[in-house]
Image (tube, rainbow, N blue to C red):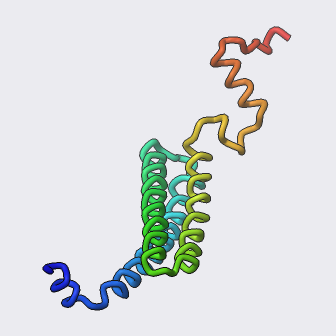
């Protein structure tokens, strides 16, 4: 009975939830755009990159991935509840596509060397040899 009284006070709660979700999604994409400019300056094009720069990069990428996953999930749940799965699935897919880009960036900058596609295989092999203690000294050649 109490829930019905509260629902009567807020008859447009579904519309409010839809609007809030749409705003949160736009803000998430806007934040990515803002941070990409900061990343370019502080990380990608910074010849004096510091540990703090790298940690902030990793922290904010992980935060964006977390928030994006929440938004995608809420879109799917709300779409099911409203029987508008197709519309909300499309929004979740757009979020997922951006999350994939963010995850790729995270791995490229902070993942294990084997997962980084911009590092030549010859360098990776040399790193494996160093770790195994089998790297031969080229000075004797």
Quadrant location, the N terminus = bottom left
Q: Residue at x 55, y 68 (%)?
A: 95
Position of residue 72 in the picture relative to residue 98 (left or right): left
Residue most toward the left? Answer: 2
Position of residue 74 in the picture relative to residue 115 (left or right): left
- The quarter of the picture where residue 4 lies is bottom left
Q: Residue at x 48, y 55 (%)?
A: 61
Question: How many discs mark residues in the rendered view?
Answer: 0
Residue most toward the top? Answer: 140
Residue in front for this viewpoint, 55 or 94: 94
Quadrant location, the C terminus = top right
Considering only vertical position in the picture, is 90 above or below 121? below
Residue in front for this viewpoint, 104 or 8: 8
Residue most toward the front? Answer: 1
Q: Residue at x 58, y 78 (%)?
A: 86
The picture places residue 62, in percent across and down from the top left corner, at: 46, 53
Considering only vertical position in the picture, is 75 above or below 96? below
Q: Residue at x 73, y 24 (%)?
A: 126
Position of residue 140 in the picture relative to residue 111 (left or right): right
Residue in front for this viewpoint, 80 or 131: 80
The picture places residue 120, in percent across and down from the top left corner, at: 76, 37
């Amino acid at each position: 009975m109490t829930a019905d009284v509260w629902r009567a006070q807020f008859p447009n709660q579904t519309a409010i939830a839809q609007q809030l979700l749409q705003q949160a999604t736009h803000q998430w994409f806007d934040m990515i755009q803002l941070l990409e400019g900061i990343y370019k300056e502080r990380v990608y094009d910074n010849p004096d990159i510091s540990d703090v720069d790298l940690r902030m990069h990793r922290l904010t990428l992980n935060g964006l991935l977390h928030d994006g996953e929440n938004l995608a999930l809420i879109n799917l749940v709300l779409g099911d509840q409203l029987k508008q799965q197709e519309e909300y699935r499309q929004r979740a897919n757009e979020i997922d596509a951006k999350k994939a880009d963010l995850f790729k960036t995270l791995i490229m900058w902070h993942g294990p060397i084997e997962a980084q596609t911009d590092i030549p295989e010859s360098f990776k092999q040399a790193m494996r040899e160093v770790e195994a203690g089998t790297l031969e000294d080229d000075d004797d050649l």
